[in-house]
Image: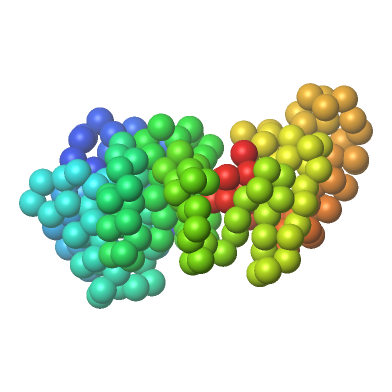
């Protein structure tokens, strides 16, 4: 069971996140915190797998709490869930050790996917936080998107328009049957195309594919 701690100063959001998360049989919300100090103290007691961390909170904000948690408990994953898309907030959160950064505009399925992927060790960055222009000229960004092309470890991998359409629908949470109905192709063909995409991008499964697509702005 994946243990989640929610840190947000708004009670309504804490309860909403808790309800959404606990509908998934693989997850359990072990506690909720109203500020960063409380989140840190609860991490000491409960050792959650993933902390959903808001940024703007009293006493100790989310970026400060992230630094505290990661300095003492590096194995605890911290996923920032905030309304702020300010570049300085994003940078400070990542510098302080955050394992991911998503906005509160995400849908239910994307939230669950982000939590699971963060737990698995994938760094999640919401597609609306960083735009392609933000990485222009950067030598540190490993994956560079050029329309339907992505560079992986120095090798250019090109996806077809059909493959990109399918990636988009996977991110939207559609299953193979729904994708086949939308594209008017056989379900077996959809399965084969997804297998090809996963192989091209050196990924393990469609969950990693969805995360990769969001992080690398494929959709």
218 relative position to 44: left or right: right
Q: Residue at x 56, y 64 (%)?
A: 142
Q: Nearer the viewer, residue 26 or 193?
A: 193
Q: Nearer the viewer, residue 218 or 156?
A: 156
Name the spot of residue 174 as percent of width and height, x first: 68, 33
Camera-side residue of 151 and 187? 151
Identify the image quadrant of residue 150. bottom right
Q: Is residue 16 placed above or below 127 in the rendered structure?
A: above
Give the residue displayed 48% in from the left and 61% down from the top.
Answer: 138
Residue 74, compared with residue 109, is above or below; it is below
Left/right of residue 70 with respect to residue 149 in the rendered view: left
- Please identify the residue farthest to the left as the structure is shown: 59
State how many labels appear.
0
Q: Residue at x 37, y 36 (%)?
A: 104
Task: Judge whether 99 appears above or below 187 on screen.
Answer: below
- Give the quarter of the image for residue 200: bottom right
Q: Position of residue 119 (x, y in %)?
A: 47, 60
Q: How is the image coloured?
A: rainbow
Horizontal and vertical percent for residue 3? 40, 57
From the image, which quarter does the C terminus lie in? top right
User: Is residue 19 visible to us here?
Assistant: no
- Residue 175, position in %: x, y? 72, 36
């Amino acid at each position: 069971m994946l243990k989640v701690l929610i840190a947000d100063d708004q009670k309504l959001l804490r309860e909403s996140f808790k309800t959404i998360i606990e509908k998934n049989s693989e997850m359990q919300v072990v506690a909720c915190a109203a500020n960063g100090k409380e989140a840190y103290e609860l991490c000491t007691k409960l050792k959650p797998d993933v902390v959903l961390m808001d940024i703007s909170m009293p006493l100790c904000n989310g970026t400060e709490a992230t630094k505290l948690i990661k300095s003492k408990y590096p194995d605890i994953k911290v996923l920032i869930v905030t309304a702020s898309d300010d570049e300085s907030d994003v940078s400070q959160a990542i510098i302080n050790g955050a394992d991911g950064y998503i906005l509160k505009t995400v849908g239910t399925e994307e939230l669950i996917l982000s939590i699971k992927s963060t737990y698995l060790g994938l760094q999640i960055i919401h597609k609306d936080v960083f735009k392609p222009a933000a990485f222009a000229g950067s030598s540190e960004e490993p994956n560079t998107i050029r329309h339907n092309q992505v560079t992986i470890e120095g090798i250019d991998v090109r996806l077809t328009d059909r493959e990109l359409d399918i990636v988009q629908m996977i991110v939207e949470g559609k299953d193979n049957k729904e994708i086949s109905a939308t594209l008017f192709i056989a379900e077996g063909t959809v399965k084969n195309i997804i297998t090809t995409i996963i192989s091209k991008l050196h990924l393990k499964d469609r969950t990693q594919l969805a995360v990769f697509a969001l992080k690398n702005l494929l959709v």
